[in-house]
């Protein structure tokens, strides 16, 4: 993989600027007035439920789909209609990547590299980076699902693009492959490349992304740094107390406890005042075996998507009708 070449517009122009973009299929708004700026060198994660519009939005950024209204600029230029000046600067892994299936892994990647004029040593380096070094002579149609996914990622990276789009790159990977890819992506970011990716793995987004955007039914409901989102919307911390230490009623009366339930052999205490509850527990039988679960991006995501989902508004309007 070659290093990104510094360009004269390096600082002034963002990697991607999306302004009031919409895309409709039939009567469904797949993307509904999304505006978003992704800085150079940023690792941006697009999150959201199935059908939220993530792939549609990413493919509009990539120039693979046309925005119905609004505008998109990649390094200051429109990616649509197909912009050949941008192609070498972008690496794209779509959710349903196409392959030269009759070729071997190495031949496939060599073909992709040749399309972009990438040096042949980049082919071997990239295969090693995605863990396909041993598979180089296997035909593409004989690869497993996860191996194909690795090859799709390699195909997006082999020409050393400045801007990398990955649509659910870790979806089919085993846990070890997922962690290996995290390292590859961290190295790419450390080299100054911009990464835009989608995922359903919230732990992963929390670990990797500088910022995430949560898309629900085509609308971007929030864009922020994961930790800031957790601090702002963060659900309560949970303290897991071994059963029998105190009973549910006693737990409910502890200062700082917002909720109590029994789950998997523990009494689970929800609180936004962890220290206060811990010292109260300490005074009533000690802290031996007590575990603390701090809120995560997943808690925030579940909270925000539930609030925004059509099912939630349906539920709310049903309740209103019942009350009326
Ligand atoms: N070419 C198309 N023709 C018709 N409808 C489409 C087309 N592409 C996407 N859609 C619809 O647009 C909506 C958004 O789809 P999209 O693939 O962008 O969702 P997503 O957020 O990527 O979901 P997932 O997490 O399942 O990958 C869905 O309702 C989908 O059915
Ligand atoms: Mg998708």
Image (tube, rainbow, N blue to C red):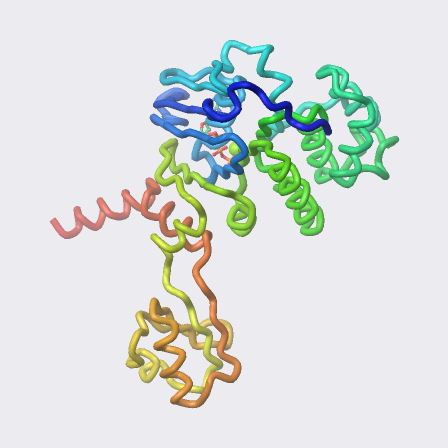
**In the image, residue 50 lies at what x, y percent?**
48, 38
Res. 56 in view: no
Left or right of 308: which side holds 41? right
Furthest residue toward front? 8
**In the image, residue 213 lies at what x, y percent?**
43, 39
Q: In which quarter of the image is the N terminus?
A: top right
Q: Which residue is drawn at 71% across and 36% down?
A: 150
**In the image, residue 205 lies at what x, y percent?**
52, 46
Q: Which quarter of the picture shows residue 48?
A: top left
State whether residue 31 is above or below residue 280: above
Q: Which residue is drawn at 29% across and 78% down?
A: 255
Left or right of 140: which side holds 90? left
State whether residue 211 is above or below residue 109: below
State whether residue 322 is above or below residue 32: below
Q: Which quarter of the picture shows residue 282?
A: bottom left
**In the image, residue 193 lies at what x, y percent?**
60, 32
């Amino acid at each position: 993989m070659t290093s990104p070449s510094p360009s004269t517009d390096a600082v002034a122009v963002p990697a991607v600027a999306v302004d009031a973009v919409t895309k409709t299929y039939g009567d469904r708004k797949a993307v509904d007035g999304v505006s978003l700026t992704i800085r150079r060198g940023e690792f941006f994660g697009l999150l959201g439920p199935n059908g939220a519009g993530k792939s549609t939005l990413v493919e509009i950024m990539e120039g693979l789909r046309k925005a119905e209204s609004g505008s998109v600029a990649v390094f200051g230029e429109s990616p649509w209609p197909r912009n050949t000046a941008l192609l070498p600067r972008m690496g794209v892994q779509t959710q349903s990547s196409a392959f030269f299936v009759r070729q071997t892994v190495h031949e496939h990647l060599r073909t992709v590299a040749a399309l972009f004029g990438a040096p042949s040593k980049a082919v071997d380096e990239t295969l090693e980076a995605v863990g396909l070094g041993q598979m180089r002579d296997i035909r593409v149609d004989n690869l497993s699902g996860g191996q194909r996914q690795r090859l799709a990622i390699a195909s997006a990276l082999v020409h050393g693009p400045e801007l990398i789009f990955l649509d659910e790159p870790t979806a089919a990977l085993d846990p070890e492959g997922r962690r290996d890819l995290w390292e590859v992506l961290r190295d790419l970011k450390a080299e100054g490349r911009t990464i835009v990716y989608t995922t359903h793995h919230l732990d992963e987004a929390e670990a990797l992304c500088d910022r995430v955007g949560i898309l629900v039914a085509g609308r971007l409901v929030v864009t922020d740094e994961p930790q800031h989102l957790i601090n702002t919307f963060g659900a309560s911390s949970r303290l897991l107390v071994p059963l029998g230490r105190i009973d549910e009623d006693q737990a409910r009366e502890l200062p700082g406890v917002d909720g109590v339930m029994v789950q998997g052999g523990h009494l689970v205490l929800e609180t936004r005042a962890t220290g206060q509850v811990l010292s109260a527990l300490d005074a009533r039988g000690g802290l031996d075996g007590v575990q603390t679960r701090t809120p995560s991006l997943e808690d925030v995501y579940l909270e925000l998507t539930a609030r925004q989902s059509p099912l939630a508004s349906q539920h709310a309007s049903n309740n209103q009708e019942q009350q009326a």
